[in-house]
Each structure stands twice: as structure tokens, then as C-alpha cells.
Image: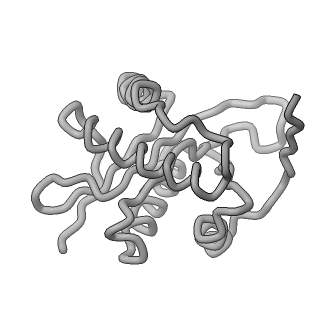
Amino acid sequence: MNVMIIKPTERHIEQMVKLADSARQYHIDILNGYFKAEATSVERDVIVQNMSQDEKYINLIAVDDKDIVLGFLLGDVLYKPWLENAKIGKVSNFVVDESVRRCGIGTLLMDAFISECQKRELQEITLGVYNKNTNAYNFYTKYGFEPIMQKMKKKL
């Protein structure tokens, strides 16, 4: 299978939304009640917003020869002058279709994201990962990501 990493266009939005829906369902299953089951319109809005402001976002998709979206990585470009490394790339949504996981798609997307962050002279990349998502956690640690903060919650 030939895979290309490209910037998404309008023709890819519905495929990306479908992948985001499947990722949300996966997180619903492992986190038991944290995510809403129906948030498709919110996912679509976020994807469209990210695509409309190229300077604030880094958006990448992996497509096959038939232009089928196999995965995507949506990232933010942040500036936080109170930090030592003030120019930050943030992975905000990273999904690989379940049928092609462990085939190198995630690696291609992450490599392309890191390269784009370097081109933009960003100094650091951050992301969030849920404790129970051990596959994602292990993927990120292989890239050298380290835990820096524990997020906590209390239901009221």
C-alpha cells in the first residue's frame, strides 16, 4: 500500500469525521462515561476550523492511492512566553484507522508533524494521552515524550 502524508482538503472532511467518531467510541469504551457518544458535529466544526487557519494549526492526513484517509493528526501552534520553550506544537487529535494500525501510518504522521514543527522553529511538542490508552502511551514514549503533569478530576 502506498501512503502519502498531505494536508487535508474539504473532500477529506467526512472521512476524518468518521475516523474521529471511531476514536471517540474507542475512548468511550476504555474510559467508561467520560466522552459523549454523539459529538459528530463538534468534530466536524473543529476539523473545519483547523483547516481554515493554516498559521495556527498543523493538519496532516495519511491517504492511500485511492485518496482514502487512513489517519490524521491535528496540531496547534502555541506561543507561551512564560515558559522556557515558548514556541510549542501541540498534538490535539491523532487518529489512525483501526484496520491499518501497526502498519506504520502513525509513525508517518508523527514524523511529518515533527518535521513541520521543526520547519516552523517550534521548540517543543506536547500532547495529552489517557492513562488507559496504553497503545498510544507506548507509541509516544517510543518517540521520547515524557509525562510532565498528572491531570485530575472530581465529579460533582
Give the residue drawn at x 12%, y 62%.
65
Q: Is residue 134 left or right of residue 83?
A: left
152 versus 9 height, above or below? below
Give the residue drawn at x 36%, y 60%.
97
The colour scheme is one colour
Residue 36 rendering spot, x and y as whole percentages: 57, 35
Give the residue drawn at x 59%, y 70%.
135
Q: Nearer the viewer, residue 75 or 27?
A: 27
Residue 7 rendering spot, x and y as whole percentages: 30, 43
Give the residue drawn at x 63%, y 75%.
142
For the N terminus, the image quarter is bottom left
136 versus 95 height, above or below? below
For the C terminus, the image quarter is top right
Q: Is residue 151 left or right of residue 4?
A: right
Residue 123 rendering spot, x and y as whole percentages: 67, 48
- How many marks on residues? 0
Residue 92, quarter of picture: top right
Q: Nearer the viewer, residue 135 or 91?
A: 135
Q: Nearer the viewer, residue 26 or 61?
A: 26
